[in-house]
Image: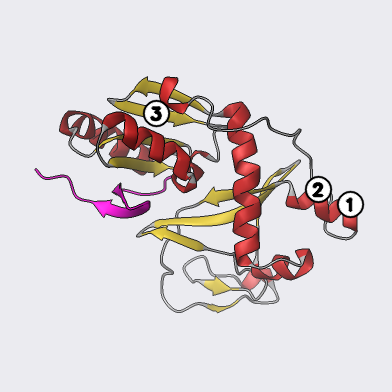
Amino acid sequence: MGILSSLFGKSNEKKQPVGAVSHDSREKTLKSIFPYFKQLLPPAGVAEALPDDLKRVDSSKTYEHPSIKPVIREVCEDLNCLYAIDNEYGYEIIQEDTLTGLAIDREQLHAIALENYRQLLSKNMKAHGDANGILFTVDGNLEAGLVLIDEIWDQMEEKIGEEVVVAVPARDVVVATGRSNRSMIDTFNQKARNILNGGDHPLSGNWFVRKNRKWEVFEPIP
């Protein structure tokens, strides 16, 4: 598609992590880190310590565990970026203590994830539609990370001549259009609600508008 061509350079072959025990395995791990979006629900009640005996776990209670502290970067409202290692079994969410093992901080983690993601996009990203409305696909898991890639939205804003709004009802669904395109927004609203309520990976019920390269919640005027 014209407005999205030539955004990214040639990508490197994807490597699989083995574990952060040696220099080589650390490098493989770093090359397999991606931004990963997940719906974060507020805890039901006060979190309790996880019992040593898992047979005593009560499904009606919320538990905490010292090793489960994912690294989270707030994007806007209910849109939160986590980070994951793509291994042979799926995506492993990066925890706070993982940063120590990899000898990196939060900002370095974010930069590494975006570099890897841009390489993935150079091979896998597709845009369906036109400047009136675009549905993006990547790999079925990482589409929501597109909100972090400024060059896509810079080009789209230039093409349509106004601020871009996006809906991200699931981590694998990103739809974008111009803020004044009420027809497109209305058309997708019901689809977004269906995805949010019945999809496998629900994410956000909001529309977001890009202002000065930052996302804000967008409230379409009735």
Side of 63 relative to 19 (left or right): left
Q: Position of residue 11 (x, y in %)?
A: 69, 32
Q: Amino acid at mark 2?
A: Lys
First to last magenta residue range: 202-222
Q: Position of residue 35 (x, y in %)?
A: 57, 50
Quarter holding residue 116: top right
Along the line of sight, which residue is nearer the eye, 64 or 113? 113
Q: Are marks 1 and 2 in contact (CB under 8 Å)?
A: yes
Q: Which residue is mark 2?
A: 28
Side of 24 relative to 139 (left or right): right
Residue name at image x 47 percent, y 68 percent: 60
Marks 1 and 2, how far apart in space?
6 Å
Q: Are marks 3 and 2 in contact (CB under 8 Å)?
A: no
Residue name at image x 64 percent, y 59 percent: 109
Q: Is residue 171 visible?
A: no
Residue name at image x 53 percent, y 63 percent: 72
Counting residues from the start of the chain, the first of labels 3 and 2 encountered is 2
Residue 51 covered by magenta stretch = no
Q: Which residue is mark 1?
A: 24
How many tags in the picture?
A: 3
Q: Position of residue 127 (x, y in %)?
A: 45, 25
Determine whether 188 is above or below 145 in the image.
above
Along the line of sight, which residue is nearer the eye, 202 or 184? 184
